[in-house]
Image (tube, helix red, strand yellow):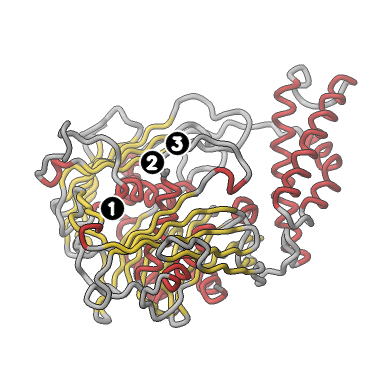
Amino acid sequence: MNQVKESIVFNGKDLSLTTGRYAKQADGAIWCNYGGTVILATVVAAKGDPAAEGDFFPLTVDYTEKFYAAGRFPGGFLKRESQPSTQEKLTSRLIDRPLRPMFADWFTNETQILVNLLSFDPNCDPRVMSITAASAALMISDIPFNGPVAGCRVVRKDGEFMINPAVRDDDDYDIDITVAGNYDSIVMVEGESKEVSEEDMTRAIELGHQAIQPLLEMQDKLAKQINPVKRAEVAKVKDENLEKFVHETCEEIVKEALSTTEKLKRYALLDEAKAELVERVTKKIEEGSDFMNADDPQLVITRAKTFFDDYLKYAMRHQIITENRRIDGRDLTSIRPITIDLGVLPMTHGSAVFTRGETQSLGVLTLGIGKDEQKVDTVTEGSSKRFMLHYNFPPFSVGEVARLKSPGRRELGHGNLAERALSAIIPPKEEFPYTVRLVSEIMESNGSSSQATVCSGSLALMDAGVPVKKHVAGIAMGLIQDGEDFYILSDILGDEDHLGDMDFKVAGSKDGITAIQMDIKIKGLPKEVMERAMLQA
């Protein structure tokens, strides 16, 4: 492949995407120059046909900051990069989330996206530009990807909006969000603010969507020059006889399960239904059936389970659309019952338990002095934190057995979102010269444990006597798309998150929004639907 390059001036900085010169054995590789920042984004997908059965997509995204990028040595005895930092893990999630829904639905080959920061210019933030670089690598590859996608950071200071500001730790922004999208729609939003209105937040998102348009265009121009031949879809023959048999067998028990309020009882019913389905499919094969591949019973059973999951998703969504009724009997806007217990741990500085339905968070607060602040020393950051929030999700919270491990990306991401939501009400150091550590222990989970963390954390702050002037609360919104119609759900359950089309978390005080996070599973979300969801929240 010959070297191909596209260049623009983006937000006053030179930006170029180059391919065909470096990392040529990857399926797609982009050398991104953004001012003095250099990013290498590569993508490789396993060869061969996609998995014949199932719809799981094994995508991994890893963002790595090399210390030499800033002319620095790594810390520690070994003086080399080792485990990824929290910031690197959070950035990996930031890249993953807008790209994942854009892959072809049928594509299930194992895929790996690696993004390396090779040169760091503090005036050119590498984290949000990594979304564009990774998307461009997919666009020029043979991987079926419905891009392009691009992202930018939008901030506001003293009433002035800025796009992709310099990487600084001391700027006092009242809005600081990352926006990712395609030409027509928003795909992801994440960030924090200082009690701003829905109108101001919507304006910031719109500005971000406008700002990424040149980034989308340059990716398309680059891809047209390469003109990659995308991998062809492998036709999967649908066993209509088996699908009909599954629907007839499971219709009544699925209907019963979708009317069962308690999660564990509902799951027990569904497990029972699957076990009965396997028995009946096996018996049908033994008696002589017209199922495809009947000489391979295990394959037929795998297909039957997939049809069962598909039918469950259809039935849940159909019930919402036609009956305005959700799994636990609520309508679309109702909130689950809430209970609060304060001061449950007598020897701690502050504690509270917040329960919403079957989601429960124990928030515990500890106060310290200046030397207890967390030191942050990464390639792109060098600072200290006097407020930190840690989120723990033990397996018992969902009735499972699992090995205890160090916090994963999900736990770090949920904790970071809750921390950003509450940081707006932490008193300044001049008024309250203490270090604050909040820990959220999730004791039950059935949807939106990160927002329960916001609520328990706010309560624990007040229980400890921290002079916060307002409470902050959070809620997760969901979405069901049916053609041109959109149904927005308040306070979603875990199943509504899993089987629905959106997870939209909004936190704030009575005076405005303090944090926001939106992820979708469809190819894009119209701005007006997002505005409706924000207002409903």
Q: Secondary structure at mark 1?
A: helix
Residue 220 visible at all? no
Q: Nearer the viewer, mark 2 or mark 3?
A: 2
Left or right for 444, reference 345:
right
Compared to 253, does 3 lie above or below? above
Give me the disc on residue 127.
Answer: 1
Count residues near mark 2 (Cα–Cα under 10 Å), then give few for <14, some for 14-19, many for 20+.
Answer: many
Image coords of residue 381 (percent x, y): 20, 54
Left or right for 177, reference 170:
right
Q: Secondary structure at mark 2?
A: strand
Residue 1 visible at all? yes
Compared to 225, does 170 lie above or below? below
Residue labelled with disc 3: 230
Image coords of residue 23 (percent x, y): 25, 31
The amino acid type found where label 2 is placed reads Val
Give me the disc on residue 61.
Answer: 2
The amino acid type found where label 1 is placed reads Arg
Viewer-proximal residue, 331 or 488? 331
The amino acid type found where label 3 is placed reads Lys
Q: Secondary structure at mark 3?
A: loop
